[in-house]
Image (spheres, rainbow, N blue to C red):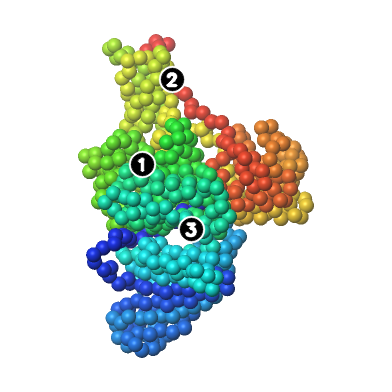
């Protein structure tokens, strides 16, 4: 996962935020919360009001919180506490009768902000955390009593002066303190059923831009940045302007933006979360210039896909793939055809890394838990849309996107609903296409084993025989055919049982290439697969050779390895390096520059690449063109190794990098090429 796509966790909120100031009063919310939070002391107090339809109400709260009282029907209600899942307590409140409005008071001292969390750990469950530099109470952390699986809400927030706070939804009221002793107060509502509430607070400077809209209320765009980030010249305004541009772009491509506002909220943690009306991104990431051109648009697009049309997780998560296709990949297409091709190639290289693992089918994908899941749910899903657009044509495909939004907005949708939208736009039956790519887990392996030409009247007939493995599905393959100064691309269709194709040509072909632009989800040939760091990061049984002798460097290597690998590596001594490489398991060698050079020479291994030598405070590279799998991390000292902990795991798609005190100053992938196949003459062959 790149920095542009910190573990994205789009909320699937089942309902529309009603933003219009209307003639009809909004119905009472299912949950009303009054919340007071002091990030300095981490003290939290709240009162919840909800209608209970049974004689008792059971709910979970985080173990740091306790119920201090409850009332129903004007009477004190009985409160009981019992055990719950790890980190939570279960509470039960008994009522005199069903159908009463219940008020619950609860409070506690929240856990402190866990500042050392990395991008992987924020993707798992987090407790509610508070600190002056930022507080985050995630929807699943048990900071409020959940009234039902789906519910509407109104939240009134109070935090000390100098702090701001918000939840997803329409801001309906705000009071900014006039003095230090007063509180900041704001109220938010989400009037249709949601599946949770995330609360954020921080010492933010808030900037706002109002955008007029045709036949819609104004759009309010906001940045919530800490003072130092806000002080970066032009940064907040650039985020506001780019947000407006993205919303206008996707409103045109899909349909009108469904909410009244959008906020970019800075987090002290390396988060990358999307909720309706906002995104919560790490402050360090927001400083990076490319984030506005990548992650920002991705998160905004989730207000259509995931937060506008909701994912039916029982039928598979289509949202991440469609968002990747229409955001990350589309931006590469805007840049150049070569940039888009590089992204497709990166998807297929990742696919090859996990080809032998049981990472599940695309239809089974729910959310990204590791790199293997991301390869399926993001890369394969995005490639499905590349292949579908190639098949239908851009105009029909774009109509299918609009059809899907028009039919499914604010509804729960699955892959079959997407199929129906594209069938409506194209007039084609697409069941075989979707079933093949959603259900087959194996990575199709297709190659050309023979290509021959023979005369066919005034033309030439090209006969091609393919070899197919793990390809029990219909394939549509592009062939680039060259000869006599001509270069043409022809598409051939191969059903599950067919291995041959014939093409009539006006010229005599001499060579050909299979899918040279990598537009089909398949296993690439060995020459197209230079080693990338993902092979080590996601390895099932990695090995670490720690070449460090000084205690502080040894510790730095081990700490970096804990961040780098998805599973704990087997630790080996430098003397075991040669033996370790005799197997098929990826090996990582790490240490200082001198220690690395000595270890490589002692084991008779290729030396440090000349193109990297002498540059930066740390160098990372994979060894290409060998039967073994070796990657190397070489740094000038322990500090340079420690500086890699946050950044290095994000560069899984690279073969080599040079870092200067933790910042990647250059990177790349070892060269690869698409093999050319010679075309033989069937007549000459028969006359021999």
Position of 619 with respect to 649 (left or right) is right
Position of 634 with respect to 414 (left or right) is right
Figure check: 103 above or below 415? below
Question: Does the residue at mark 1 contact the one at mark 2 (Cβ under 8 Å)?
Answer: no
Tag 1 residue: 385
Q: How many marks?
A: 3
Residue drawn at (56%, 44%), measured in percent from left and top?
651
Choose mark 3 or mark 2, whichever is in front. Answer: 3
Quick one: SS at disc 2? strand
Quick one: SS at disc 1? helix
Mark 1, residues whose alpha carbon is within 10 Å: few (<14), some, or many (≥20)?
some
**Foreground: 386 or 402?**
402
Mark 2, residues whose alpha carbon is within 10 Å: few (<14), some, or many (≥20)?
some
Is residue 402 visible from the viewing direction of this image?
yes
Quarter containing the C terminus: top left
Tag 3 residue: 206
Figure check: 380 above or below 273? above
Res 589 → quadrant: top right
Q: Position of residue 470 (x, y in %)?
A: 41, 40
Tag 2 residue: 511
Residue drawn at (58%, 70%), measured in percent from left and top?
40
Compute the Cα span from label 1 to label 2.
29 Å
Q: Give the mark, 1 or 3, whose residue is nearer the N terminus.
A: 3
Q: Position of residue 134 (x, y in %)?
A: 54, 63
């Amino acid at each position: 996962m790149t920095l542009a796509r910190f573990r994205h966790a789009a909320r699937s909120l089942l309902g529309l935020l009603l933003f219009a100031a209307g003639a009809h009063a909004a119905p009472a919310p299912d949950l009303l919360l009054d919340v007071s939070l002091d990030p300095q002391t981490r003290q939290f107090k709240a009162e919840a009001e909800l209608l209970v339809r049974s004689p008792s109400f059971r709910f979970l709260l985080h173990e740091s919180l306790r119920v201090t009282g409850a009332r129903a029907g004007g009477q004190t209600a009985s409160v009981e506490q019992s055990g719950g899942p790890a980190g939570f307590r279960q509470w039960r409140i008994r009522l005199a009768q069903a159908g009463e409005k219940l008020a619950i008071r609860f409070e506690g001292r929240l856990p402190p902000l866990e500042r050392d969390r990395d991008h992987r750990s924020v993707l798992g469950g987090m407790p509610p955390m508070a600190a002056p530099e930022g507080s985050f109470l995630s929807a699943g952390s048990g900071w409020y009593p959940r009234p039902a699986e789906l519910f509407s809400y109104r939240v009134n927030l109070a935090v000390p002066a100098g702090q701001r706070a918000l939840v997803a939804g329409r801001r309906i009221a705000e009071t900014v303190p006039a003095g230090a002793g007063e509180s900041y107060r704001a109220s938010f509502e989400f009037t249709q059923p949601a599946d949770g509430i995330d609360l954020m607070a921080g010492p933010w400077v808030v900037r706002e831009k109002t955008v007029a809209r045709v036949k819609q209320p104004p759009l309010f765009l906001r940045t919530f940045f800490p003072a130092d980030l806000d002080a970066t010249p032009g940064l907040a305004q650039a985020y506001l302007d780019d947000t407006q541009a993205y919303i206008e772009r996707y409103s045109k491509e899909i349909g009108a933006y469904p909410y009244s506002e959008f906020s970019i909220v800075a987090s002290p943690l390396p988060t990358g979360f999307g909720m309706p009306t906002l995104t919560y991104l790490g402050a360090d990431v927001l400083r990076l210039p490319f984030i506005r051109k990548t992650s920002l648009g991705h998160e905004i697009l989730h207000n259509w896909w995931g937060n506008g049309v909701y994912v039916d997780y029982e039928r598979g998560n289509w949202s991440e793939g469609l968002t990747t296709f229409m955001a990350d990949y589309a931006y590469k297409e805007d840049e150049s055809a070569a940039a888009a091709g590089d992204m497709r190639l990166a998807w297929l290289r990742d696919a090859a890394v996990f080809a032998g693992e049981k990472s599940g089918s695309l239809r089974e994908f729910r959310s990204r838990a590791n790199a293997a899941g991301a390869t399926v749910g993001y890369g394969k899903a995005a490639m499905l849309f590349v292949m579908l657009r190639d098949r239908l044509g851009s105009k029909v495909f774009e109509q299918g996107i609009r059809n899907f939004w028009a039919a499914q907005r604010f509804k729960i949708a699955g892959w079959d609903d997407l199929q129906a939208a594209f069938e409506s736009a194209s007039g084609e039956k697409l069941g075989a296409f979707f079933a093949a790519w959603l259900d087959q887990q194996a990575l199709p392996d297709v190659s050309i084993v023979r290509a021959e030409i023979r005369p066919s009247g005034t033309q030439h007939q090209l006969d091609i025989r393919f070899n197919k493995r793990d390809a029990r599905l219909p394939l549509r393959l592009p062939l680039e055919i060259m000869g006599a100064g001509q270069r043409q691309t022809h598409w051939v269709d191969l059903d599950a049982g067919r291995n041959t194709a014939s093409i009539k040509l006006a010229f005599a072909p001499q060579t050909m290439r299979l899918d040279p632009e990598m537009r089909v989800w398949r296993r690439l040939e060995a020459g197209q697969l230079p080693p990338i760091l993902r092979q080590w990061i996601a390895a099932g049984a990695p090995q670490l050779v720690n070449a460090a002798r000084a205690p502080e460097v040894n510790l730095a290597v081990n700490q970096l390895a804990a961040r780098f690998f998805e599973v704990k590596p087997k630790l080996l001594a430098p003397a075991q390096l040669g033996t370790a490489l005799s197997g098929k398991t990826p090996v990582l060698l790490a240490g200082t520059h001198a220690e690395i050079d000595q270890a490589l020479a002692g084991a008779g291994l290729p030396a440090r690449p000349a193109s990297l030598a002498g540059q930066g405070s740390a160098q990372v590279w994979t060894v290409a063109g060998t039967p073994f799998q070796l990657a190397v991390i070489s740094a000038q000292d322990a500090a340079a190794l420690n500086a890699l902990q946050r950044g290095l795991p994000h560069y899984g798609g690279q073969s080599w990098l040079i870092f200067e005190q933790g910042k990647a100053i250059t990177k790349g992938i070892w060269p690869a090429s698409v093999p050319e196949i010679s075309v033989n003459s069937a007549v000459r062959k028969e006359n021999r």
